[in-house]
Image (cartoon, rainbow, N blue to C red):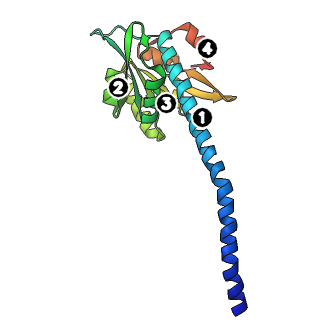
């Protein structure tokens, strides 16, 4: 028994050394994978931000009762995407209107937006936001599954590693938003 205790005590420093060596080799791999993943998320956000800006060129909103001096893009649910949207689009304009970026926390704030990107992991939250904005002339966009079937207007999808989009034209029409035939032609699916 004493021999077993002595050999196990000698084993721990060796096992500890091997474990430490393994961590020395694995830690950079884990960190670089995280970095690559973060880098891919950043790239994906930039591409989606560019899509959002380009959507505004092919969408016609109803004429508001009060003339707006700015075009307001909003994000709900993901402050990181909001920051990336501001960085990507910057000082660009939409039909001579300065683009303003807002992060909103409840559906009532969407009244001040022309476009809202919804990024909620919880489907009930997503469904609630869509329902709350159904009567508003607000273009709703998301990358969440079943967004279109919930009543959202444009859903990003990844096909063969590329970002594409589907359009729910009936949802847009019910909010008096006109989608250009050019944009409809670029969509993967139109409902």
**109 or 49, which is in the foreground?**
49
Which picture quadrant has residue 92? top left
Q: CA distance from mark 3 to mark 4?
A: 22 Å
Q: Earlier in the sequence, mark 3 or mark 4?
A: 3
Q: Quadrant of the C terminus?
A: top right
**Residue annotated with mark 4:** 186
Q: CA distance from mark 1 to mark 2?
A: 29 Å
Above or below residue 133? Residue 13 is below
Q: CA distance from mark 4 to mark 2?
A: 27 Å
Q: Residue at x 60, y 28 (%)?
A: 157
Q: Nearer the viewer, mark 3 or mark 4?
A: 4
Q: Is residue 71 left or right of residue 19?
A: left
Q: Nearer the viewer, mark 1 or mark 2?
A: 1
At mark 2, the secondary structure is: helix
Q: CA distance from mark 3 to mark 2?
A: 18 Å
x and y, in percent, of residue 179 in the image? 50, 11
Q: Residues within 10 Å of mark 4 (few under 14, many from 20)?
A: few
Q: Nearer the viewer, mark 4 or mark 1?
A: 1
């Amino acid at each position: 028994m004493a021999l077993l205790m002595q050999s196990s005590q000698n084993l721990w420093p060796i096992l500890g050394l091997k474990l430490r060596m393994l961590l020395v080799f694995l830690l950079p791999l884990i960190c670089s994978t995280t970095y690559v993943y973060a880098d891919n998320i950043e790239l994906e956000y930039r591409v989606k931000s560019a899509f959002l800006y380009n959507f505004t060129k092919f969408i016609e909103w109803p004429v508001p009762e009060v003339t707006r001096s700015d075009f307001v893009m909003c994000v709900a649910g993901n402050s990181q995407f909001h920051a990336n949207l501001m960085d990507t689009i910057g000082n660009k304009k939409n039909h001579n209107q300065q683009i303003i970026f807002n992060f909103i926390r409840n559906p009532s704030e969407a009244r001040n937006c022309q476009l809202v990107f919804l990024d909620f992991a919880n489907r009930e939250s997503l469904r609630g936001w869509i329902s709350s904005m159904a009567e508003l002339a607000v273009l709703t966009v998301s990358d969440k599954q079943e967004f279109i079937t919930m009543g959202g207007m444009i859903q990003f999808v990844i096909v063969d590693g590329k970002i594409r989009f589907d359009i729910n034209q009936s949802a847009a029409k019910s909010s008096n938003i006109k989608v250009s035939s050019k944009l409809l032609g670029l969509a993967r699916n139109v409902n």
